[in-house]
Image (cartoon, grey):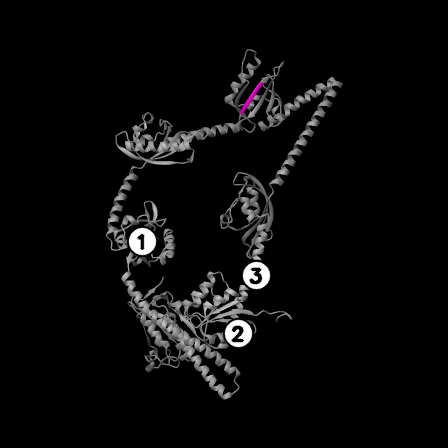
Amino acid sequence: MKPPGSVIHPISVLYVDDEPALLQLCKIYLERRQEFLITVSEGATDALALLSEQSFDAIISDYQMPGMDGLLFLKHLRDIGNDTPFIIFTGKGREDVVIEALNSGADFYLQKGGDPKSQFAELAKKIQYAVARKRSERALRESEDRYRNVIEDMDELICRFDHDGRIIFVNSAYCRHFGLSEDEIIGSRFRPEIHPDDLEKVSSLYASFTPDHNSDIIEQRVVMSDGRIVWQRWSTRAIFDEKGSILEYQSVGRDITGLMERDIELQRANDELSAANEQLTAIEEELRHQYEELSSAQNEILLSEARYRAIFEYTSAATIIIEEDTTISLANTAFIDLACSTRKDVIGRSWTEFVSLDDRKRMLTYHQQRRDTSGHPPRTYEFTFIDKNGGTHSTHITVGMIPGTHQSVASFYDISDRVEMEEAIRKSEEQYRMITENITETITVLDLSMKIIYVSPSITALRGFSVEEVMGQSLADILTPDSLSIAIERLEQEMWQENEGSADPDRVVILNLEEYRKDGSTIWVSNTMRFLRDDEGRPDSILILARDITDQRAAEEALKENELFNRTLIEHLPDYILLYGADGRILYINSLAADALGYKADEMIGTDVITYVAEEYRDSIQNKITLRLQNMDMPSYEIEIASKTGERYSVLIKGALIRYHNKDAVLLVLTDITERKAAEIALHNANKKLQLLSGITRHDIQNTLTVLQGYLSLAIDQNNDSALSTYLNEIAVAADTIDEQIAVTSQYDACGPNTRWHKVSESLPVLLPGAITIKNDCNGLSILADQILQKVFSNLLDNTLRHGQKTTQVHLFFEIQGDECRIIWEDDGIGIPDDQKEMIFKRGFGKNTGFGLFLSREILLISGITIHERGTYGKGARFELYIPKGMWRIDT
């Protein structure tokens, strides 16, 4: 119900048809509803003129019109950006026309014919639905645009990504922040580089999300592409589906680097103030101490001793006081910790108990010498310290005598980590030397004057010379004259690039060179070279990794001979042979193909293969070139190629992806089918003319019949004469019969020589009457038949419905006898009398049009299939379809 006082704007509709009577009839029916305002046009050209001056809510158009038909009219509108809802309303009922219309942007396709009231009511519903849908789409786009503008204008970084990390949305601020375009980010798994110290925190955040805890905030550091470290605060929400699985994440972030830097600066200032306060406190304590010194000498001694003990106790070095008899009289906390002991256990024990047996004798000698004025023991040295638990520590010790006593003070530093590192470096150097001395490839280092300064022992296996012999050789002693010239030229070129500053410092150069062995023979060696550089990045030597490729070269030569054989074979094949590379350019073409196109083979090498394809095939061939290079399976197909003089040849193309000179390439075999195509075109044109004549005649009759039925319906509605009503109703029945007969003829327009494989189970009628079921035992069976095979089974079902009387079930199955297959359609109705078993296939026989079984037999005969009725009258009908050899198969 419409709200009181609301203003209802009628839907404006442009109706285009070349039949004036049909235009008028449609206008009358639709405008009676007071919901439509109809503007009519007798052709697409006039309609385009109207559309240039005003807009309409919807467009209705006939298909078959002079000048510009309905499909061309639709395509023109969509090409110029006009997206007005478009409905095809025509008597043309072919499936290919329906598909092309919908693919070209038509909203609906409605066929003329039948009851005018129902037809125009259906047309009105289609118009209302299409207009409502278009208005909803427009409102949705406007809403999305407003939302996007708000998001794009925000300074916050906004992104959405799915559970696999694939980005599905970012705003402009996000792209600017990370210096990437939207196209580079959307669809990728871009992830900012998280600072190593924050990785665990970020991972824990995402692992914590559940349907009950689906959002959180985190502050993290990100390493930008230029090396800067920035702070970011992210608010992230996880979106879950009804099963509790994560669909996507939505994150909003902000750069808080400035805020964090201010916090850090504030903390630093606070630390400096605390340090200053501590310093002031220390100064105050010192002043108080000096005051107390002046007041009491005794207190000064006590305080001096306290300072001594404090220094001794809190120094970071493990420190002890040693008596002359080697006992420890005092030890600080650091030493207690090093010994893994207690102060009680350490005091009074000999320091020798903390020294390894290997070091004890030497250190006792030092102890005695230190107390003997004539001795000169070292002040610092290293030894192995043994803790209470038996643990060993590499330790650096500093020992000195306390003046005026026989006591000494010793400080210990645990250097175990440094020693372990030095040992690791030593082992690493040994491993490196072992690798270089045992590697099968040979490592050589030259200085920039081309003098050998290092060569690995594997040189003996490679060239037969010892390391000492090779160290004295020059490049001329190593390389054959041709290879020497190549090597010197390339090295001079590389040095020139270094001097120019235009070379990549990390580049690698590979040269295959012929080298002398000690026995006088030569081998081919692959040399991988790069510069070694000093601390300033300047080259100071050349590192060469050499590998014997003699066998590889021999294999390559054998491959060349094989290629020559294959090339000779291809040149004498009766088909056109062509090879193209990843860039679509011809790598090889045989003489037969080149001669047919009017060129020399050398002229065509390096040219684009598309050059020789007829213009109208080039777009599809470009796509096939790409698919071939992706190793996609592709059936053979037909195109036309053009010669130098413009003459065209029809060819059947087969191809395969191969390796050619160590690169991907596509091999094409083109079979000339020009003569066969000429015969097919002649047959197709003859069939097309017959179908065109049939279609035009049926279209004109259908339009006239639609007008007749429309005015007849109006006459019946306004007639009050009962006698006249009887005549009008009879006329209506006759008109409906004509309509049905036209529909029957249209169903067989596609009947012709075009056959294809059909799965029998997929050719059965989809919609069945409620009282009948089909038991299908033809799964896996396919037959080669006319493209409208499905109509045969529809006619068989129609025959069962009309004449079976008591039919409840149809059984469809097949039997194989030798090379022949037989499909059986068997029902449980009353069957066909014996005297009518062949008559039912005659044209005109039966209670209706008489075309059903007649045309079914004709359709099957196109493919060599025959049909007969073999049932027993009173038990049911049994139709048997005989499929000849080669026209059936069992799919596995």
In the rendering, which numbered label is found on residue 437?
none
Between 386 and 595, the one nearer to me in the picture: 595
Say whether residue 155 is magenta: no
The reply to whether callout 2 and callout 1 are in contact (CB within 8 Å) is no
Residue 590 relative to residue 257: left or right: left
Amino acid at dot 2: Leu
Return the x and y of residue 266 as percentages of the image width and height.
65, 36
| In front: label 2 or label 1 | 2
Q: Residues within 10 Å of mark 3 (few under 14, many from 20)?
A: few
How far is disc 2 from disc 1 in space, using C-alphas? 59 Å
Q: Inspect the magenta stretch and tell me whether residue 396 lies in it.
A: yes
- Residue 823 appears in the figure: no
Relative horizontal placement of residue 101, taking residue 155 as reference (left or right): left
> Rounded to the nearest whole Å, what is the CA distance between mark 2 and mark 3?
27 Å
Report which residue position mark 2 lands on: 30
- Magenta span covers which residues? 395-399
Q: Position of residue 538 (x, y in %)?
A: 43, 30
Of callouts 2 and 1, the N-terminal one: 2
